[in-house]
Amino acid sequence: MKISLEHADNSELEVIIKGDISSEEAINVIAALNASAFGKLMLQGEGESFLFNATDIIYFVSEQGKTYAVTENGKYEVKEKLYVLSDSLKNKGFIQINKSTVVNINFVKSISAEFSGNYTARLKDKKEMLIISRKYFNSFKEFVRR
């Protein structure tokens, strides 16, 4: 990847991506820019694209090769990979809790230990519970402490 910076006298920052914008590298760059700089994510549902604030997303889940964002209004497809979302949204309160789920910590109501060694996260305002696997629990605990 080639990065070029150019000074301009106007105050508005402009980002131009040239090349194959459908490549994984371009998608990762776009996801990072969307998530960290603008705080908005483009989600797909019902044949339309919707803009959401990252803080309105309860969790992301990867199922059958696709990534989805779950909000209070429903489930929407996301074009970015789960690992890209996890990395780019850490500063917005998101943490990966198992191999297929990244949760917004602001929507977690409580945690309980399971007999299997995993943990269960109960979500606020939802009856839904998510599994925090043993592999991810220590990083989850450290994330909550900071």
Image (cartoon, rainbow, N blue to C red):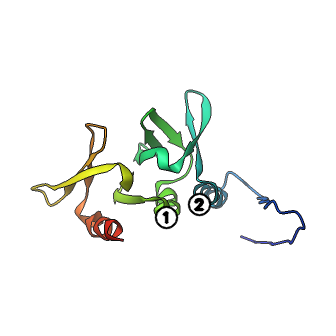
Question: Which residue lies under the disc numbered 1?
Answer: 91
Q: Residue placed at 28% from the left, 67% from the top? A: 141
User: Which amino acid type corresponds to the residue marked 1 in the rendered image?
Assistant: Asn
Which quadrant of the figure has residue 116? bottom left
Say which residue appears at 81% left-offset and 72% top-offset: 5
Question: Would residue 33 be visible to someone looking at this image?
Answer: yes
Decide which of 57, 67 is in the foreground and name it. Answer: 57
Local crowd at mark 2 within 10 Å, few (<14), some, or many (≥20)? Answer: some
Q: Nearer the N terminus, badge 2 or badge 1?
A: 2
The quarter holding residue 70 reads: top left
Pick whichever, 88 or 53, lies toward us: 53
Q: Name the residue tied to disc 2.
A: 36
Q: Quadrant of the N terminus?
A: bottom right
Residue drawn at (60%, 36%), measured in percent from left and top?
50
Say whether residue 120 is visible: no
In-image side of 120 versus 136 (left or right):
left
Residue 45, given in percent of the width and then of the height, sits at 54, 32
Q: Secondary structure at mark 1?
A: helix
Quarter of the image that includes the C terminus: bottom left
Residue, far right: 9
Residue 37, position as x, y percentages in the image: 63, 60
Residue 38 x, y percent position in the rendering: 63, 54
Disc 2 vs disc 1: Cβ atoms closer than 8 Å? yes
Residue at 57% over, 36% down? 44
Left or right: residue 13 compared with residue 105:
right
Q: Characterize the local packing of mark 1: few (<14), some (14-19) or many (20 or more) Cα atoms within 10 angstroms.
A: few
Is disc 2 placed on a helix, strand or loop? helix
The residue nearer to you, when weighing 25 against 138, is 138
Q: Nearer the viewer, residue 92 or 103?
A: 92
91 relative to 46, above or below? below
